[in-house]
Amino acid sequence: MKGSDKIALITGITGQDGSYLSELLLERDYTVHGIVRRTSNMLRSRIEHLRRNDEIYGRRLFLHYGDLSDSTTLRRIISDVRPTELYHLAGQSHVGLSFEIPESTCEEAGMATLRLLEIARSQPHPVKFYHASSSEIFGNASEIPQTENTPLRPTSPYGCAKAFATQLARVYRDSYGLFVCNGILYNHESPRRGENFVTRKITRAVAQIARGLEHELVLGSLESRRDWGRAQDYVDAMWLMLQHEKADDYVVATGQTHSVRDFVEAAFAVVQLPSEKYVKHNPAFDRPSDPVHLVGSAEKIKKALGWQPTGSFDELVREMVEAELAAIDSSVTDG
């Protein structure tokens, strides 16, 4: 396939994963199209460096206004762009927030996926479809570690919506022969992680404490454990899934868990400060229901597609803290 024939359409292009995926696809000679909401004008910082590049923007990278609830516009964009690969990453993805806005979470994560699958099915040309599933579909998991065959037992509105969308993707693959893959991704972090996620909240506060701008870090439970990987590795996994000759589902994970406490201590270690001096617990931040032990087995994707995670947990935390310190220092310089 020639470079000009490789056309990707990304929902959620302004998010953490969307921005890294855009960079990866542009490096691999794709033309990249992204769907953005009009209200996301203020939230495009993650792809601003691409938009400012005259060699890329308007030539190999294009943005289209659209909303996941508007099937008419989605259908028109997909018909105009004629993507060979569609990466559906958009939607409210904060688990804690899904308890506060369950209906819109289910609309974005569930029904929007159905809309896109239906549009992809009706296209005259074949579209390879990547659906961003989540480890939250396993919730109160019946086995450790979880695999592609682990029963779905979600414990949050977000997990329920993702479980619905994941099963739909399988139905469209089995019933209509659509090339659709579920990437069952475990938590993945980077300096581009949203500020309402606990990892980013920690690294940002640690950097501010180190620079004397803050004096404490207030968190919910420090004992929650997660399987945390690097976002840059996980978008590579998405791409690999759509290059395989057969569509399938894959767990993408490191196979190791760390607690929020581990993350906090690793972050404070970067700035050489004692965590116990600054961390305060607030029960209001505890979740109504927290998955017991989510840790994934990535054996299938390693064997089938040759994917491997890179870097250690400590290196990931260091990368995030150093990016926060650099941002503070550059704002002081600019100011």
Image (cartoon, helix red, strand yellow):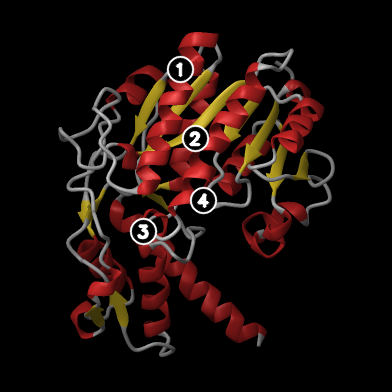
Between disc 4 and disc 2, the foreground one is 4
Residue that label 3 marks: 96
User: Disc 1, disc 2: CB below 8 Å?
Assistant: no
Task: Decide if residue 240 is on the left or right side of residue 125.
Answer: left
User: Disc 4, disc 1: CB below 8 Å?
Assistant: no
The first of marks 1 and 3 along the sequence is 3
Between disc 2 and disc 3, the foreground one is 3
Q: Is residue 246 visible?
A: no
Q: Please state the horizontal and vertical placement of residue 293, each as a whole percent of the image.
A: 18, 45
Sort mark 1 into few (<14), some (14-19) or many (20+) by Cα contacts within 10 Å: some
Between disc 3 and disc 4, the foreground one is 4
Q: Nearer the viewer, residue 218 or 237?
A: 218
Tell me how far mark 3 sits from mark 4, CA to CA. 13 Å
Q: Amino acid at mark 2?
A: Asp
User: Disc 4, disc 2: CB below 8 Å?
Assistant: no
The first of marks 2 and 3 along the sequence is 3
Disc 1 element: helix
Tell me how far mark 4 sits from mark 2, CA to CA. 29 Å
Q: Nearer the viewer, residue 148 or 5?
A: 148
Q: Residue at 32% x, 71% y: name it.
A: 270
Disc 4 element: helix
Residue that label 2 marks: 236
> For residue 171, which numbered disc appears in the image?
1
Sort mark 4 into few (<14), some (14-19) or many (20+) by Cα contacts within 10 Å: some
Q: Please state the horizontal and vertical placement of residue 163, each as a whole percent of the image.
A: 38, 34
Q: Nearer the viewer, residue 246 or 99?
A: 99
